[in-house]
Image: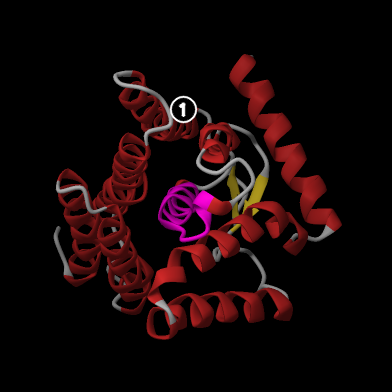
Amino acid sequence: MFGIKDIFTTINLLGGIVGICLCVDGRPFEAGISVMLGYVFGDTLDGYVARKLNSANAFGAEFDTIADHTSHVIAPAAIVYTVYRDVGLLPAPWNQVLAIALAASLVISVSVRHARNIVSPVNYKGVWAGLPRSVLGFLAIGYCNAALAPHAPGGWWLGVVLIPAMGLATLTYLPFPNHHMKRSHFWYVNALIGIFFAMTIGMVFVNPKFFFDVLFFWMAGYSMSAWMSLTPDERVAYRQTVAAMKSQAHG
């Protein structure tokens, strides 16, 4: 069952594993880089390779789900814990309790979302129901490793509100368009996607210190505006799909 496509999924998984290990060493910035390298050289390619080789199968889908949960949820939660354990917002031992609670808010919310979507999926092609786990993970990584985070209004306290709020956003049924839509994306959506990759990757060479600031900016932008890439008819159809799912679940 393990094929060429699964090698790329393994790269994605390894990015998360290395990231978790780096957090044990107290190196959240390098951990975030590891996760992003796994995403760029693994997660962005496994589906493409599977389609080109016509090798998609149930094993690959399950393996990809596990890899994404590890690299885009568990590893970011470890980064959140490591950063908030060390910033000292509260006296010991409450500082560590706070760090654990923030990390747990990510893992628990995404785990609940995953179980919900298995039992009562929203089957609308091209749209994720609730904030996607990868976006949630990258938002958390971006904020915690951002050079400007300590200088934001409220400093690190902003994350105490922001991180659980992002976790709650994954449990909503808000629509988040993905690359599996029935139609092609609007030209400006494709342009923004291209600019995101160019700016984010380019920042590594221009000023790595602000790499995660740029990542957070784009993930926040997607979170707040992605619904705009749906047409009015698609929004209505999506809401009808959600309503039908809820009615069937409660019936």
Farthest residue in the top direction?
Answer: 251
State the residue in front, 158 or 77. Answer: 158
- Residue 125 lies, in percent from the top left, at 60, 54
Callout 1: SS: helix
Q: Residue at point 24% right, 51% down?
A: 63
Nearer-the-camera pick, 175 or 133: 133
82, 202: nearer the viewer: 82
The percent coordinates of residue 167 (x first, y second) are 52, 35
The residue indicated by pointer 1 is: 119
- Give the number of marks: 1
**Over which residues does the magenta segment extend?**
134-150
Q: Main secondary structure of the magenta part?
A: helix
Side of 138 where 188 appears, left or right: right
Q: Quadrant of residue 248?
A: top right
Q: Is residue 118 left or right of residue 241?
A: left
Q: Position of residue 49 (x, y in %)?
A: 31, 75
For image coordinates 35% across by 47% down, the residue present is 76
Give the farthest residue toward the right: 232
Q: Hey, which quadrant is residue 246 in on the image?
A: top right
Q: Is residue 54 magenta?
A: no
Q: Amino acid at mark 1?
A: Val
Q: Is residue 213 above or below residue 130?
A: below
Q: Give the residue drawn at x 14%, y 58%.
A: 1
**Depth check: 123 or 18 in front?**
18
Question: Does residue 175 sit above or below 32 in this rendering?
Answer: above
Q: Give the residue at x 50% y 41%.
A: 156
Q: Quadrant of the C terminus?
A: top right
Q: Label 1 neighbourhood size at 10 Å, few (<14), some (14-19), many (20+)?
A: few
